[in-house]
Amino acid sequence: MSEAAARSAGPENSDDVVELRIHGAASGGTGPGLDLPPVEQVAGDASGGFYRARRDAGSPGGDRVTLEAYRWADLPSGTVAGTLAMVFLLPFMLVNVAIWMRPANPGSDLVVRSLCRLLALTLTVLYVLTVAGVALDLIAWKCLGSPHCLTGRSWLSWLGGRPVGVRLAVLAIVPAAAVGLVWRGSTRPGRVYEAFRAPEEGVSGHRLGGVGRWDAEPLVRRLRSLHVAAAFATLDAVLLVTRLAATDSAGTLVLAVLTGAVLTACAVLLCTPALIDRSPADRRLDRVASGLRTIALGLTAAAAADVLAAPRRWPEEAGLPGYDALLTGLFVGQTALLAALAAVLLVRRDRRPPGRPLFGLGALVVAAAAISLAAAFSAELVYRVTDFLDRDAQTAAGVAAGPPRAYTWAIFGFFRTVLITLVVAGLVTLISRPGRLRAAAAIVARDHPDRAEAGPRLRQVREAIAHARFTELLIPLAVVYAGLAAAGTATTTVGLLRVVPGDVVERFAGLPADLVSIAIAAGSWLIALVILGLVLGGIFAHRTAGFRRHVGVLWDLGTFWPRAAHPFAPPCYAERAVPELTRRITYLVGRGQAVLLTGHSHGSVLAAATVLQLPPRVSGRVALLTHASPLRRLYARLFPAYLDDEVLHEIGARIGWRWVNLWRDTDPVGGWVFSADRSPPPDPAGDPAASVDRRLRDPTDVVAPPGDSVPPPIQGHRPCESDPRFIAAAHELVERLRAGADGGPHRNGPGR
């Protein structure tokens, strides 16, 4: 028996209710979760564990209530190195989220899943083309062919003067190693989480109930094999297209045809969800996928040998032959896939009122953002390496060595997208501000009447509420950004005409080409700043709880979902957290204790998914208290196929409607779940959902209380475990648990 299991099996407190708290994105410590610093671990491990107050410290939970906290903060990120790695995997994570944002329309489900997986495959191809562009185009072809570029670079000069085939074959190790690196990294989470599986008995049939329950590793394994096969086939294509530029060889043509067949087979398999999502017990597709991977690896070795056997005379071109065409062709394919996804989502969108805030285009919005960000990252890497190698160097053909035109268009498109989005966001902010302030003023006037003497504090509260209401405007802004990003990807295909942005803009818009060059340079530095900001954000989010409060929400939202589109995306923490919570609650109920499950922010999402996986005999002894919950405000809007009124009502019914949701008007993330009414009706009139939502006035007052010199703070999205209103709601739910497993009468709590 493991140490954690031994702790869990030890003697329990005799209290009949356990309050199990699940922290949100901003509260990773166990002390804040228990409101008591001295704690001890009773189950789990360092990444995800259950903690209680030490027995010698007394119980903070009140009469016959034991406080316990589940700490999952390290599951999404873990170490700083893991956090930084996730930053560079951000496009993979976004495209993986896109497949979960598909609309709740069975008629378009298969097509949307297929298109999202094809878009994910293009990101893997772009990843390989980028690394191959640096190693084979910039270094092997351009720099190693220029004595001036090799001057002072002993780490490269040993390859200088050698045949082109040798240089290409040797430096092909770099993209091959890059593929191996992400391949190796993507296999770790499956082994870590394989022991965490929820029981199958009595789980919900709703889609959200499957998150963390079904074994995602077989699907990830199939996707991984196909993506690795496509990655090595992409490297083969670069080598073989270059080889064909030197001479027409029958053997090279055969290898090129086989490479194309591997890429086509990978795409076809990804377009057949009935095969790729097959039961884990059916290993036939696993053998097909691993067979394609093996063939691609063999073709890579054959392509490298073929390049080595090429004649010493190669065409004198400025760039690697065929590379620019392959890169631009990829952008053409991405544009076509985005257009097809937009067409499917628009034609098959849900037209029933009130409609969806993303207009049914959630998958398109996130996929377009992923493509745009990946193209920007790739272009910036190539540009920075070009600057590092460039010393006014000339290639053997006497042409200045520069990045491919497709990357120039990609940077120009990214700069244009960000600039226009910022302008639109500024206009939306200014135009919407009066309306948001009027709504906030009405709320403040109701909450704090006859407080005219606290004018400055009232203005602060109004600003906080108006700022929190801006969240609803982020959704149309995301649609604007996605449309511009898709347009940027489309304009990248202009590189096929062998023109640069400056020439096109000067000819059709009349603006000086030098101005466009300045914009491209600014765009390059903007991308560098974005990357630097993501890196620093990852570090500070890992080390600083206050900073994590602002950036952790989006990251935890993305990594909550299993890898169903891209196998190199960051691992899904719900694959461990939800089954682990399910097992713990089942264990506690089996020992005769009831469980009050409380969740803050994303902790409430974990709690909701956990309730759906509890057997009826267990959920009958569970109550739910959520606060600052994004269930309705974010998840129901962004993931309509997985969270809707039906599943929310099922959650309430499974626990006998022992559910209270606390929310604040100053919270930019959390909100109400069933009703936006700020005063719940005294009689729910037969609808138990009407008594779930309870608004917390924030701040509690705008003047300093007796004995204090400052007014109560504005809490916003912060947890509220020490708030007397939270304590009262928890006490009410505890009493309802003690009243009986059937939930008793659906009583309202104290007035809020």
Image: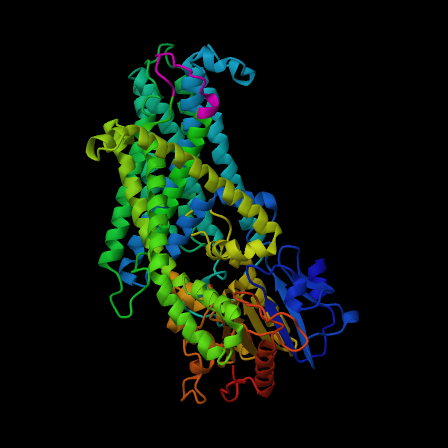
Is any atom of residue 170 visible in this view?
yes
Q: Residue at x 45, y 51 (%)?
A: 563
Q: Give the image location of residue 113, x and y in percent.
A: 34, 53
Main secondary structure of the magenta stretch? loop
**Outermost residue, front side:** 453
The way the protein has been coloured in the rendering is rainbow
Above or below, 677 relative to 155? below
Q: How many marks?
A: 0
Q: Nearer the viewer, residue 414 or 636?
A: 414
Q: Residue at x 32, y 39 (%)?
A: 413
Above or below, 725 relative to 21? below
Residue 134 colored in magenta in the image: no
Q: Give the image location of residue 41, x and y in percent.
A: 70, 62
Above or below, 598 relative to 41? below
Q: Give the image location of residue 237, x and y in percent.
A: 35, 28
Q: Nearer the viewer, residue 553 or 341?
A: 553
Q: Nearer the viewer, residue 185 or 10?
A: 185
Residue 394 colored in magenta in the image: yes
**Outermost residue, left side:** 508
Q: Give the image location of residue 246, x and y in percent.
A: 32, 15
Is any atom of residue 639 visible in this view?
no
Q: Is residue 273 left or right of residue 506?
A: right
Q: Which residues are magenta?
A: 387-401
| Quarter of the rendering occupied by the N terminus | bottom right
